Amino acid sequence: MLTLASKLKKEDGGKTGRASGASDSTHRISIRDRLLTKEVAELEANLPSTCKASFPDENKLHHFQLAVSPDEGYYQSGRFQFEIDVPEAYNMVPPKVRCLTRIWHPNITENGEICLSLLREHSIDGTGWAPTRTLKDVVWGLNSLFTDLLNFDDPLNIDAAEHHLRDKEDFRNKVQDYIKHYAR
């Protein structure tokens, strides 16, 4: 993170030394990267205790992973990995998020697709993405999918939701089986 932040500071300081009208696109820092420098610092200072963010390349804040380890509920004792890609058009469009861990969850498919309203670019109910949202909102939303946002009434994985409706104890057992095999 420090590398990109240092680069941004150096870029801001170097602007005054350029000849007026001169433009060097190789030195331009995108709006997304400027936002991410600020948001990542805020995110790291305010991560839920059950989450850990990791950046494979500290110069690419737009691509990172999030590990969520719920400490309560059905998914307690599991460790779930998410991949987060922030597109160039951020913050006008939401980040792309995918669950890398196979999971039995009503709002996450076994292929990693996620149903979380704030990740929707267009939402009828007004809870979708807005330019005022940040990465912190995304991380807290993903974390909440394992507790208070666990939604069996509007599922993406219909089989998991119906399983829960039919037999809660068997649902719990299947969740624990998935944790044992995929989420350790």
Image (cartoon, helix red, strand yellow):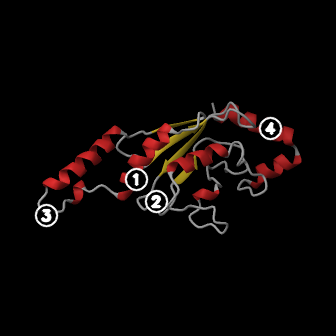
Residue extending farthest to the left is 19
Residue 112's x, y, as percent? 61, 49
Nearest to the observer: residue 134 or residue 150:
134
Residue 98's x, y, as percent? 57, 49
Q: Which of the labelled discs sits on residue 20, or is there none?
A: 3
With respect to residue 162, does 177 lie above or below? Answer: above
Residue at the (34%, 38%) spot, across then down? 2
Nearest to the observer: residue 40 or residue 163:
40
Residue at the (32%, 43%) spot, across then down? 5
Q: Which residue is mark 2?
A: 91
Q: In this rendering, which labeled residue sits more in front, label 3 or label 4?
A: 3
N-terminal of the two: label 3 or label 1? 3
N-terminal of the two: label 2 or label 3? 3
With respect to residue 50, does 14 lie above or below? Answer: below
Helix, strand or loop at label 2? It is: loop
Q: Which residue is mark 1?
A: 35
Q: Rounded to the nearest whole Å, what is the CA distance between mark 3 and mark 1?
A: 26 Å
